[in-house]
Each structure stands twice: as structure tokens, then as C-alpha cells.
Image (cartoon, rainbow, N blue to C red):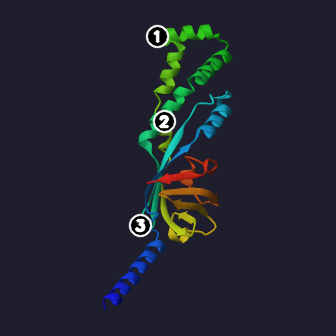
Amino acid sequence: MVKKISAVLLVLAMLLTFCACGADNNIAGKWKTTIDLSEMMNAYMSETIGAETPADAKIAITLVMTLRDDGTFTIDADRDTLSADLSAYMSEISDVLLELVYAEAEAMGMTREDFDAQVQLAYNMTTEEYVASAYGGMDLSSSFDVMEAAEGVYKVDGDKLLFADTKDELSESDYVKFTLKDGKLTFVSVEGDGIPSEAMEMVNDSTLPWVFTK
């Protein structure tokens, strides 16, 4: 009798293990990843202001992805750290911004000395202090406020993670290929519109792979 009971318990344990492996619960939870945007941002600044940013100018954004047991998700930037990260980046490229200001002054026919004198007279500060005040005082994270968090439903299909606004819009041709190992959820590649468009307004898939941890 004891052997039979033990055998039944063993079978039940195996079934529970099998069910747990087959469910999506192991992927559910709040995940975070920090994405290096330095190359993308430096290229953008170079194109827009026509000057090369320092190679050591670094900026990153933290994405928070919540995958719920009910099959819904949210992806958003960690806005608590965003403002500080952007301000630090602007500080690192202060010399580039200073040159931009001088270039604008020279385009108006002013020498740097004349511009320095005008800034000192108008604001009682040096041009360097003026630039630091103008850019350093900006709430740069406000530019992300118009970007809403990505929300909707998700589905796990093997090593594919599908996102959509509704269940009816889930498509097997639009997915993120992922791995889940040792407590790390890694977005390896994107097929079609695999990543919600709202998230792609903050980053792009050229920064893949993204490694999330809980």
C-alpha cells in the first residue's frame, strides 16, 4: 500500500512539474533592462548640430516590462532615473554645446569675444555658465512624457514572445525571439512588428540583444 501511495505521489509530482513547465508563469513578473543608447544618441547629435560628440559620452535608458499572469503587459521607461541620466549626458557633451552656441553667434557676425561680453552684460555670467544653465536646467525627460507606456496582451509560443493591443491582433509573423535562462530574459531578435511601437519610440532594435532581469 505504501509503495502504491508513493507511486501515486510521484506521478502527481511529475504532472505538476509538467504543468508548471508548460505554463507561462515562469516568464511573468516585472523585468528591467538597461539599454545603451550612446551610439544612437551621439549619431543623432552629430547629424543635428554638425559636431562630433565625445567618444566617452554615454547615455542609457532603463526599460521596465511587466508581464502579468493574465496575459497582459506593460513596457515603459524608468522615468525616475531618466531625467538624471539625460542631464548627465548633456553635461558630458557641454563642450560640443558651447561650440554650437559660438557657431550660431559667428553666423550672426559676432566674434566670440563680443558674444562673451554680451552674455556677461545680459546674464552676469560667462558663456560657459550660460550654456550650462540653459541645457543643465532643462527637464530633458519631459520629451519622453508624450510617449505613452506600451500596453496590451502577450503570448508565449515556444521561444517566441508575441505582443499586441488585443488578443485578436496577435500575429505569429510579429514576434520577439527570446531566451529564458538563469533568471535572465533575453530579447535576441525581432521579426516584423514584434516590439510594441510605443517602446520603439524610446529605443530601436539596433540595440538588441536586451537582457532583462527581475
* Res 85 label: 2
How far across and down, in percent of the image, does residue 170 sit? 56, 68
Q: Quadrant of the C terminus?
A: bottom left
* Count of number-bearing discs: 3
Front in this rendered view, residue 48 or 188? 188
- Asked whether, in this view, residue 142 is left or right of residue 210, the answer is left
How far across and down, in percent of the image, does residue 176 sit? 59, 61
Q: Nearer the viewer, mark 2 or mark 1?
A: 2
* x 62%, y 20%: residue: 99
Disc 1 crowd rating (10 Å Cα; few below 14, some 14-19, many 20+) is: few
Front in this rendered view, residue 122 or 98? 98
Vertical relation: 127 (above or below) 18: above
- Circle 2: element type: helix
Q: Quadrant of the N terminus?
A: bottom left
- Circle 1: element type: loop
Q: Amino acid at mark 3?
A: Asp
How far across and down, in percent of the image, does residue 161 sit? 55, 64
Vertical relation: 158 (above or below) 108: below
* x 53%, y 29%: residue: 90
Label 3 to label 2: alpha-carbon separation: 32 Å
- Circle 3: element type: loop
* x 46%, y 10%: residue: 124
Comes first in the chain, label 3 or label 2: 3
Q: Amino acid at mark 1?
A: Asn
How far across and down, in percent of the image, does residue 13 sit? 39, 78
* Res 69 label: 3
Comes first in the chain, label 3 or label 1: 3
Disc 3 crowd rating (10 Å Cα; few below 14, some 14-19, many 20+) is: some
Front in this rendered view, residue 108 or 156? 156
* Res 124 label: 1
